Structures are given as C-alpha cells and as structure tokens.
Image (cartoon, grey):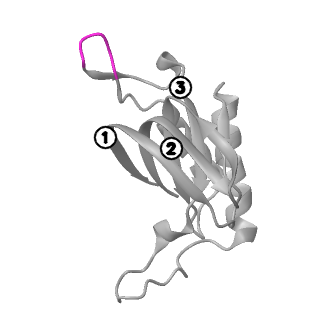
Amino acid sequence: MRAVVTRVSSASVSIGGQTVGAIERGYLVLLGVGPDDTEAVADKLAEKICNLRVFEDENGKMNLNLEQVGGTLLVVSQFTLYADTSSRRPGFTGAAKPDVAIPLYERFMEACRARGFRVEHGQFGADMQVASVNDGPVTILFEL
C-alpha cells in the first residue's frame, strides 16, 4: 500500500458538486492499493498513520498524534499512486484491480475506526474533487 498523508486544518471530497466527506483538523489520506497487498498490510498502515506524531505540542515540536489533538481522517482512493512514469503517459497496471483494492481500502478505513477515529471518505473509482487546506505544510509518504 502507498499513502500520501497531509496534515490539514480542513479537507473535503466532492462528487458531481456534492460534498460526500469533509473533516476539520486531521489527515487527508490519499490511499493506493497494490496487487500484493493484504489485510495485514492495511492494518499495519492504519496503525502507523493513526499513531503518526506530526501535530505540534506546547513547545512547537511535532510530538502529538491524531488522538491527542482530536483529529479525524478523510480517506480518498488513489490508484494513481501506482503510476509507472517511465514514459510521458503514465501506466497504471501496477495498481490492484477493484476486486482486491476495494476490500483493502475498506479494511484500512475500518482499522482506523477501530482505533476510535471518525473516518470520512470518497467513493472508490469515482471522479472526485478533493479540496484541502494543508497545515504546515506537513506531508508524509508511506509505502508498505
């Protein structure tokens, strides 16, 4: 799995002009699923992201995690994280097919919810418009 995690002060995802998910302080997670990913990988990635300490403490140090600041997550499926950029026109055959990717995308979100977090999300495979106000900016890449 690959994820781009951005610390945000707000983020939303819309489909056809309708907002389907929105958060205030928390993480915007763009999530890509590879063909060899498993439920264990989804669980491990959720654990890493939910415990990531990138919020500032009283001393201005990035030392607090999502739970400590009362944050939420907005998760958006992003198969393009598996783009093959060896040519000018990217190929996406490295991304998992929907029959593999959808259950793992949902498993990742459920693993975050099981940790007590509110999780908003887009719609797998939809043409989505994502808006965010990056905080910092702080953006972390994950690949498991």
Identify the magenta region: 56-60
First reached walking from the N terminus: tag 2 or tag 3: 2
Q: Earlier in the sequence, mark 1 or mark 2?
A: 2
Residue type (three-letter) at the residue carrying disc 2: Leu
For label 2, count other residues whose C-alpha is less than 10 Å away and answer few (under 14), some (14-19) or many (20+): many
* Residue assigned mark 3: 71
Name the residue rendered at 42%, 88% in the picture. Answer: 89
Residue at mark 2: 28
Secondary structure at numbered mark 1: strand
Circles 3 and 1, Cβ within 8 Å, touching? The answer is no
Callout 2 secondary element: strand
List the residue tagged with mark 1. 137
Q: Above or below — where is 113 with respect to 86? A: above
Name the kind of residue labelled 3 in the image: Gly
Seen in the picture, residue 106 relative to 51 is either above or below; the reply is below
Residue in view at x 70 percent, y 30 percent: 114
